[in-house]
Image (tube, coloured by chain):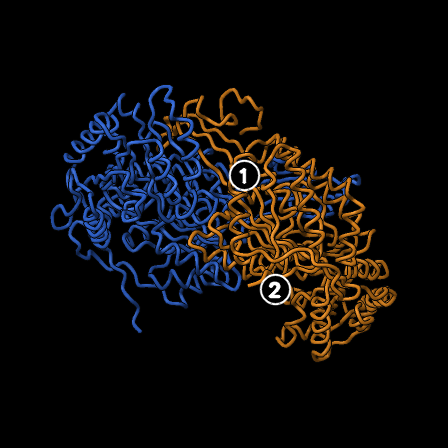
Chain colours: A blue, B orange
Amino acid sequence: MAAEPVWSVDPRTGKPREQVAVEATAEEIDRAVRAAHAARGALADRTARAALLRTAADLLDEAGDHVIEAADAETALGPVRLTGELARTTAQLRFFADIVDEAAFLDVTISLPDATTTPPTPDLRRMKIPLGVVAVYSAGNFPLAFSVPGGDTASALAAGCPVVIKAHPDHPATSELCASLLRRAAAKAGLPEDVVSLVHGFDAGVRLIRHPLIAAAGFTGSVRGGRALHDAAAARPVPIPFHGELGSLNPVVITGAAAEERADELGAGLAASMTLGEGQFCTKPGFVLAPRGEAGDRVVAALTAAVSETEPGVMLDHRMRGAFLDGVRERAALPEVTAPVTPGAGGEHTVSAGVLTVDAGLLPGGGHGLLLEECFGPVTVVARYTSRDQVSAILGMLPGNLTATLHIAGEDPAAASLLTELTPLAGRILVNGWPTGVAVAAAQHHGGPYPAATSTSTSVGGTAIERWLRPVTYQSTPQHLLPPELRDDNPLGVPRS
Amino acid sequence: MAAEPVWSVDPRTGKPREQVAVEATAEEIDRAVRAAHAARGALADRTARAALLRTAADLLDEAGDHVIEAADAETALGPVRLTGELARTTAQLRFFADIVDEAAFLDVTISLPDATTTPPTPDLRRMKIPLGVVAVYSAGNFPLAFSVPGGDTASALAAGCPVVIKAHPDHPATSELCASLLRRAAAKAGLPEDVVSLVHGFDAGVRLIRHPLIAAAGFTGSVRGGRALHDAAAARPVPIPFHGELGSLNPVVITGAAAEERADELGAGLAASMTLGEGQFCTKPGFVLAPRGEAGDRVVAALTAAVSETEPGVMLDHRMRGAFLDGVRERAALPEVTAPVTPGAGGEHTVSAGVLTVDAGLLPGGGHGLLLEECFGPVTVVARYTSRDQVSAILGMLPGNLTATLHIAGEDPAAASLLTELTPLAGRILVNGWPTGVAVAAAQHHGGPYPAATSTSTSVGGTAIERWLRPVTYQSTPQHLLPPELRDDNPLGVPRS
């Protein structure tokens, strides 16, 4: 069977631009994983790991114009957004280099012998070690920050795990370019290039998760694709951790007081957040509970006005565009759903942002369940509520989310109880903000109850490194045989508890 | 359909003692889980949680004679062992109460606003919160420390998660007694009794893992049972974390130098460890690589002598006894396997400990794979090796383990490279010790690569609490709405980073 070609496609026209690669065969997958496995010993050197991450950031910055051009040609995200995304990506690589240097992630813990406990405690010294080769499934909507040089790759390399990356089919040329820079960075850091490799193809992705030497996987994408890979990871003879970020509705609750105070600001802010990047953010606010009445009407009016003014935009690919058009059509066709701005086709290759509204009282009936599912693209659903009980009833129906947002005013009496109800729904809770924009910080959490994530881990921020580690305890081991991190003299000066 | 009776059985005779309970129906499971879910809010009070754990320890200690008598009647483990296990269990409950008080497990992390990052960092404050109701599947071999009042229950309650415990069928009366003490402790601590409940029955266990309000599960038991529950947890509409400890061979490597130095001590130590508790420990050393030659012969001779002197013992139940007899018979029948002490039936209800030996060179051939699988009960397999390469080849064939043990002497030249090869195989690495006996300590790790564990977590030691928590980040949230742990003034004085 001839190798299937992998094409780079221009989403602005739907036309193929160039053949970039071919899909990986089973043998090629096996070779990439084995080469990565063989290279893992070299990654044990934390100094080299940190150098790899910083060099990768430098090479990406140096090739910035080229990277941005490649990504824009395949994603239509535009140079402004992609310039910001590249800066985020290289900052993230350097952030994880700092984490490697600090070495707190090793979680070194020492329990000295204690004959008074039941049973007695021998000399126990624990640290975290890398799991092995990590499979990274790139996202389509962030061709840099959640793709080949993105957070999963950066955190896995920081943990000491080689990566085999399954390229997202929407930006194969960008993926090839970034992978070549990462491999070059490895060589410059004195590491085998095979600590990073790239494969293309749907079947390749399925084979990858089943490979016996794959020790864990990271995924950012759809519920359907992520769930299939999650299930395959769990069904292996040796199951492996699968850290997937699958889908999120990102509910927003606007109290009556907030609507009274700043209806125009809320409408404009919501419009900006839901249309950012053509609504292709995993944190897009897709469902809004806004009060009935005059203040709520003003929120919707401001939202409507701002969304009406947005230009039609190009989505990441024509399949996503088709799914968006189908999704908004199905939702708009539900009983008593209205569209103050109709979402749908713009031109031949573009989409227009829109807003759907519905009476919140209809939702518990069961016939409007689709409104509580994520619709990828520039649309949000505003459910108008008349009572606090209605809000609670609907919050109780929501699936897990990456974010949940509360808009309040001053000493809003409803605030505390609403926050209590929102907390179980999401991994990040915002007050008076908008969920798009995920800072790379120590206290970040980008995850949440399923389907937001398939584990309790985060895919953004410092603790993302924890996904690729496991603890090991050495008992009664002579000093000279211990890893240096665990020796009494702590020659590497790692933090301990 | 009539409710299935649950009998307490005397393993010393195989005869039923008394009917203790009936198997839980689907409705009863649903009621227990819903009651636990409704009680979770009360457990948010950490002071009450710590009081519950300490009161439970006190009540267990007060009822000690009664508890030990009940456990001995059902498990035949004997009052000496059970007295130690009860002390371990109550110490573990108090250990987790201290962990609750220290509050470090909340992992409070604050990132202050920083406009210089890309993207800018808003005010982010993260802590860990309880996952929800935890299903605990009790082990048979520790009727206290890994059963109703054991580590899974203690760590889940410490995390703030109510538990619904599936009783192990080998000790239903002990389970009922302990559950009643835990529920009494809850009431004394001002908490709803339903933070702890107990159910019996195989079908009940399967229903429990599928209940939509179960948020996570802990399991200690067989590969077969654990894998089935793992798969059910992964296949749920909303998959949940399944922390299972399933099986472990616990390999031991004895170097030539160690055998030369202390053959008698090694043989006697191994005999004591492998026969402890009738070989029914998950950390029983089940596979030993010992050198060919005179020194190795002396190790085997000392092992043989010590094992020959052990009295026949009673296993936990007659099904396990049958599985042990089948297991040793199949292993002994493999080509060129010899039995210096034949393991098998003792009297009508007992088993005799034994030792099997084999030439290590035969193992890579593939026909002796059964020797590399755990056989629950008092038997160990000694594989005699002639070269370092043979050791490496066999270590490369082993599945994941809870422990791996190395016996060396002085500045043994083989030590460093052997430790490097043992580390990927297990969660705890011992030098010159024996793996049975698992201290409850901060630096403990009781887990390891599959099938030792189904996750990277531990089921013993302070970090066992992490299994039942998830992080949540509050973004730009006004001080008065933040959980007190995250406020600037830190009114509860919790540790932070």
The reply to whether dot 1 and dot 2 touch (C-beta < 8 Å) is no
Circle nearer the viewer, 1 or 2? 1
Q: Residues within 10 Å of mark 1 (few under 14, many from 20)?
A: many
Label 1 resides on the chain identified as: B
Disc 1 versus disc 2: distance between alpha carbons? 48 Å
Which is more N-terminal, label 2 or label 1?
1
Q: Residue furthest front?
A: B2
- Looking at the rendered structure, the kind of residue marked 1 is Ala
Q: Dividing the picture into quarters, in which one does residue A417 lie?
A: top left
Asked if residue A436 lies left or right of residue B231, the reply is left
In this view, the residue in front, A119 or A124, is A119
Q: Which residue is mark 2?
A: B396
Residue at x 51%, y 40% (from the top left corner): B38
- Residue A344 picture location, percent across and down: 16, 46
Residue at x 24%, y 55% (from the top left corner): A8
- Residue A399 picture location, percent across and down: 38, 45
In this view, the residue in front, A292 or B269, is A292
Q: Quadrant of the N terminus of chain A?
A: bottom left
- Residue A186 picture location, percent across and down: 44, 49
Label 2 resides on the chain identified as: B
Residue B420 visible? The answer is no
Q: Quadrant of the C terminus of chain A?
A: top right
* In the depicted structure, whether residue A274 falls above or below residue A409: below
Q: Which residue is mark 1?
A: B39
Residue B317 visible? The answer is yes
- Looking at the rendered structure, the kind of residue marked 2 is Gly
Q: Which mark identifies residue B257?
A: none
